[in-house]
Image (cartoon, rainbow, N blue to C red):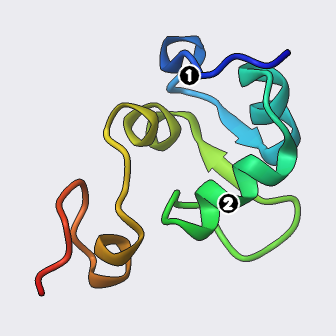
Amino acid sequence: MAKRHPNHRQVKIHRNYTVEEIAILFGIHKNTVREWIKAGLPVLDDKRPMLILGQELAVDRVEPVDPAAALAGIRGRAAPQ
C-alpha cells in the first residue's frame, strides 16, 4: 500500500525528475503526478519526457497549490473571488 502523505524531504533539490521517478520516489501512481502537473506543478518545458525540477517539487509538496490560484498565477493562496 502506498504512503498516504509523500515525504517531501526525499526530494533532492539539485536534480531533475521524470513523472515515473517521482512516482517511484513517493510510492504513488504516475497518474497522481500527472494530476499534480495539471494542478500547477511546474515542468521545465512542453517536451517529453516531462522534467520537474527537484526544488519546485519540494516546494510544491510543502506548499500545496490551489488549482484556481495556479491559473491566476498566485501560489499558495486561494484565488480572488
What residue lies at 63% left-to-right and 29% top-to-bottom?
Answer: 15
Q: Tell whether 26 sits left or right of 70.
A: right
Q: Nearer the viewer, residue 67 or 43?
A: 67
Q: Nearer the viewer, residue 18 or 79?
A: 79
Residue beneath disc 2: 35
Hey, which quadrant is residue 59 in on the image? top left
Pick the quarter of the image with the N terminus.
top right
Query: In the displayed structure, would residue 4 be above or below residue 68?
Result: above
Residue 17 image position (x, y, % from top left): 72, 38
Q: Tell whether 76 sits left or right of 57.
A: left
Q: Nearer the viewer, residue 1 or 7?
A: 1
Query: In the displayed structure, would residue 31 be above or below residue 24?
Result: below
Tell which circle, 2 or 1, labels the residue nearer the N-terminal end.
1
What residue lies at 85% left-to-right and 39% top-to-bottom?
Answer: 29
Residue beneath disc 1: 5
Check disc 1 and report its element: helix, strand or loop: loop
What residue lies at 46% left-to-right and 31% top-to-bottom?
Answer: 58
Residue 24 image position (x, y, % from top left): 85, 25
Q: Are marks 2 and 1 in contact (CB under 8 Å)?
A: no
Identity, as a three-letter code, of the amino acid under mark 1: His
Q: Tell whether 16 sits left or right of 55.
A: right
Hey, which quadrant is residue 74 in on the image? bottom left
Hey, which quadrant is residue 76 in on the image? bottom left
Residue 23 image position (x, y, % from top left): 80, 33
Question: Disc number at residue 46?
Answer: none
